């Protein structure tokens, strides 16, 4: 008996927010993006950002470096600035945790924000980006590391009806949708 192939988390996210294939098409290929950012990227991230422009799901916001040369350069600059801030020992962002910063082996690399001063990171401890865990810090503390992938974290946030999500707080009052910003156009797709 043949089993139906398992849907990806990206397929589930698209279904939850009512996103259709073809609603967005990136301009840059992933080989170019990875070369510019200086790191391989997880396949689920590339699948998600092949379908969605910069935007967010509930309170997980991200920029899409595949949108174009300018967007890729902006993300590279923003990530470098964020890594520099987190490296400042006087600010103490890494005090009390064992994380190192990218490009150190196993260093954390940013992929999104919560729009309120918190950051989502990949823990690049594995040579295979598809095995990278997800770390999250809000302005006050680091939360428990999640085994990932990041698209499961997003899907879990979209289906959360209480505090069972990476934030640890109730998001049930927020719409299950995608809000995007692409080429200065506001895009919203309610699920």
Image (cartoon, grey):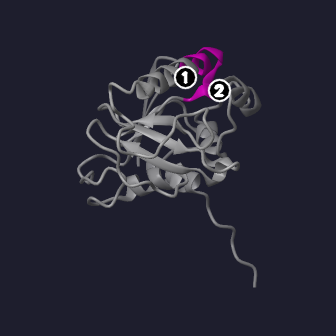
Residue where numbered disc 1 is placed: 75
Residue ranking furthest to the bottom? 1
Are the two marked residues, 1 and 2, in contact with CB atoms closer than 8 angstroms? Answer: yes
Q: Position of residue 62 (x, y in %)?
A: 47, 33
Q: How many marks?
A: 2
Of 107 and 17, nearer the camera is 107
For the point 46% across and 35% down, which residue is it?
112
Specify whether 168 is left or right of 38: left
In the picture, measured across the screen, residue 147 lies left or right of residue 24, that is: left
Q: Residue furthest top?
A: 70
Q: Earlier in the sequence, mark 1 or mark 2?
A: 2
> Label 1 vs label 2: CA separation?
8 Å
Task: Estimate the x, y position of residue 49 in percent, counting from the top left.
Answer: 59, 37
Residue picked out by circle 2? 37
Q: Residues within 10 Å of mark 1 (few under 14, many from 20)?
A: some
Look at the image and say whether residue 73 sits in the magenta stretch.
Answer: yes
In the picture, measured across the screen, residue 27 lies left or right of residue 56, that is right
Magenta stretch in the rendered image: 64-74
């Amino acid at each position: 008996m043949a089993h139906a192939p398992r849907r990806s988390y990206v397929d589930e996210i698209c279904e939850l927010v009512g996103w259709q294939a073809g609603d967005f098409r990136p301009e840059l290929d992933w080989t170019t993006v990875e070369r510019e950012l200086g790191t391989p990227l997880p396949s689920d991230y590339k699948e998600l950002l092949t379908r969605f422009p910069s935007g967010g799901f509930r309170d997980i916001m991200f920029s899409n470096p595949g949108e174009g040369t300018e967007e890729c350069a902006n993300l590279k600059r923003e990530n470098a600035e964020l890594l520099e801030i987190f490296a400042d020992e006087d600010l103490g962002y890494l005090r009390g945790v064992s994380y190192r910063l990218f490009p150190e082996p196993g260093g954390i690399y940013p992929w999104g924000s919560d729009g309120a001063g918190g950051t989502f990171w990949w823990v690049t401890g594995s040579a295979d980006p598809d095995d990278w865990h997800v770390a999250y810090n809000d302005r006050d503390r680091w939360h428990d590391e999640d085994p990932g992938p990041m698209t499961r974290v997003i899907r879990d946030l979209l289906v959360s009806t209480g505090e069972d999500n990476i934030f640890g707080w109730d998001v049930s009052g927020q719409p299950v949708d995608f809000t995007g910003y692409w080429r200065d156009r506001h895009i919203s797709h309610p699920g």
